[in-house]
Image (tube, rainbow, N blue to C red):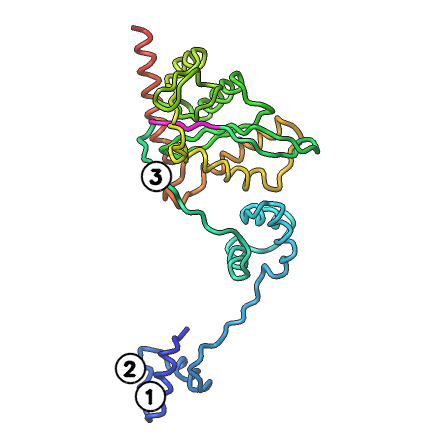
Amino acid sequence: MLSQNQRTTILELHNQGVSKREIARTLGLSRLSVRKVLKSNSSTLPVLVRPEKAEAYRIQILELLALCKGNLVRVHEELAGRGAEVSYPALTAFCRRHGIGQEPKVASGHYSFDPGEEIQHDTSPHEAEIAGKKRLVQTASAVLCYSRMLFFQCYPRFQRFDCKVFLTEALRYFGGSAGRVMIDNTHVVVLRGTGAAMIPVPEMEAFAERFGFRFAAHERGDANRSARVERNFDFIENNFFAGRTFSSWEDLNAQARDWCGRVNSTYKKFIRAVPRELFAIDSVRSEERRVGKECRSRW
């Protein structure tokens, strides 16, 4: 589309008696474009009126937006499931133009990690509909800090036994362990102390040694230190749980595992990579650590 300055110049040159061919050659435009401007005899940009495909689904979008807690990915999935023929870009553009959506989040800190260096683990309560009833579930999550590979499962409660079950499942999912598992100062793992002075429960220390890692706790008040895992709880709540129901605990955790597989195979703009591709480097370091531990145990 021609700019307003270009349209104004065309009209001024025409009023000065310059031919259409010469105007087109001087401004580097086609003669057809010049003729259209002269025919309109106006420098005002024409308003493009394009039908919005998403307009036909406005009511459904607003309903699903509330149901899916503002997550447009889930809104689009539900619309597609109902047979709506609207692309995700068309949906997001429609929501931007009409002021529908959420404010962008601002990053509050940054830490860098080498491959295989750290896994961050934490839990958070969420509400889920299981077998037709609203239940409070404890969501346990683990994130490989270098590749951002994510794994989570849900439990009715989260005690020491549940922690060992979850970490075992997480390490199986990742195919190995990082050298350090960062936690908050939870009593499930901590015997006494906080931060760098934290001493784990002997039972949990022995568990960690078996898998070749050590527990570490971040300092009190240093929320950014566990940002890799913390930020995913909001993602899980507003994407995984949004609009989903589950027939049982087994169904919930099966869907969670499948969802992690899709998320880990999706390109992430903030790291400019696919977690599963970066995971190849993480897994090499984890394998080196496992082999090294086996060699040490033989000696």
Name the foreground residue: 164 vs 203.
203
Amino acid at pointer 3: His
Decide whether residue 212 is among the magenta residues. Answer: no
Answer above or below: position of 174 versus 79.
above
Is 64 left or right of 48, judged from the image as shown? right
| Quadrant containing the N terminus in the rendered view | bottom left
Give the residues drawn in magenta, as a range: 117-122
Residue 47's label in the rendered image is none
Badge 3: few (under 14), some or many (20 or more) residues near its Cα, within 10 Å? few
Label 3 SS: loop
Question: Circles 1 and 3: CB distance less than 8 Å?
Answer: no
Residue designated by label 3: 110
Residue designated by label 1: 13
Q: Main SS of the magenta segment? A: strand
Amino acid at pointer 2: Thr
| Quadrant containing the C terminus in the rendered view | top left
Label 2 SS: helix
Name the foreground residue: 152 vs 24.
152
Point out residue 28 in the picture as x, y percentages from the top left corner: 31, 77
Decide whether residue 118 is among the magenta residues. Answer: yes
- Label 1, label 3: how many angstroms apart (C-alpha)? 56 Å
Answer above or below: position of 163 versus 43.
above
- Label 3, label 2: how many angstroms apart (C-alpha)? 52 Å
Which is in the foreground here, disc 3 or disc 2? 3
Which is in the foreground here, disc 2 or disc 1? 1
The residue sitting at the right extreme is 132
Q: Quadrant of residue 192?
A: top left
